Amino acid sequence: SSCTFKTKTIQKSLDNAERMIASHPESALALLKEIEAEKIHMEKNRARHALLMSIALDKKHIDLQSDSLIKPALKYYSRHSKSKEALMAFYYTARVYENAGDLENSMKFLIKAERNQNRENPYVNSLVHSAKGRIYNQLHQYDMASVEFKRAAEYSTEDGDYNKYV
């Protein structure tokens, strides 16, 4: 009974954090930090917590350089490769490697995300192509960067995010 209560409380906290992560990442991060990751028993909730923590930290411009936080999400969501969460796990793993200066591994995960993307996730697709553009830009492959930034812009407008498009 207490395990069920604890699981429902964790799920409710994760739901609340997910709702506010886009507009109030600092509040979402504070809520997520209150959850003790080692006390999350369900693999699905551990993965969700890891993914949401990675997103909140990235939105707060806290650049992780180790994949230890995102690993549970990557492991769990890789089994569901077409889901939005899998795309996000691939993307945020790529961000970790990009932050660490490992552009090769970053691109590897961006390509995984791109191979599994679908039209239902234009927001995630725009993030993936924008990141690929940044990497190509760092490698002085400006033609490829331009192609990727154009794709990111197309997905941004499809998502209705005209600020990101600009």
Image: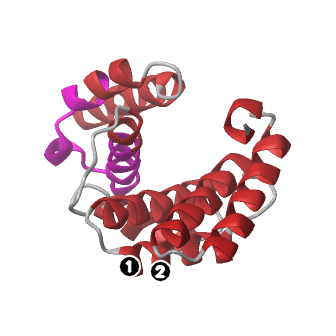
Dominant secondary structure (helix, strand or loop) of the stretch shown in magenta: helix
- Name the one closer to the observer, 5 or 153: 153
Q: Is residue 123 above or below residue 142?
A: above
Q: How crowded is the residue under tag 1: few (<14 C-alpha within 10 Å), some, or many (20+)?
A: some
Name the quarter where the N terminus is drawn. top left
Tell me the amino acid under the disc marked 2: Lys
Residue 156, horizontal then vertical, whole percent: 75, 44
Identified at 68% across, 46% down, the residue is 123
Q: Is residue 155 left or right of residue 51?
A: right
Q: How crowded is the residue under tag 2: few (<14 C-alpha within 10 Å), some, or many (20+)?
A: some
Residue annotated with mark 2: 108
| Residue 49 counted in the magenta span | yes
Residue 129, horizontal then vertical, whole percent: 64, 62
Identified at 37% across, 70% down, the residue is 75
Residue 21, horizontal then vertical, whole percent: 47, 28
Q: Is residue 143 above or below residue 68?
A: below
- Name the one closer to the observer, 116 or 57: 57
> What separation in Å lies between label 2 and label 1 (alpha carbons)?
5 Å
- Name the one closer to the observer, 68 or 110: 110
Q: Is residue 96 above or below residue 114?
A: above
Identified at 48% across, 65% down, the residue is 90
Residue annotated with mark 1: 105
Identified at 69% across, 74% down, the residue is 143
- Name the one closer to the observer, 80 or 30: 30
- Secondary structure at badge 2 equals helix
Tell me the amino acid under the disc marked 1: Asn
Q: Which residues are magenta?
A: 31-54
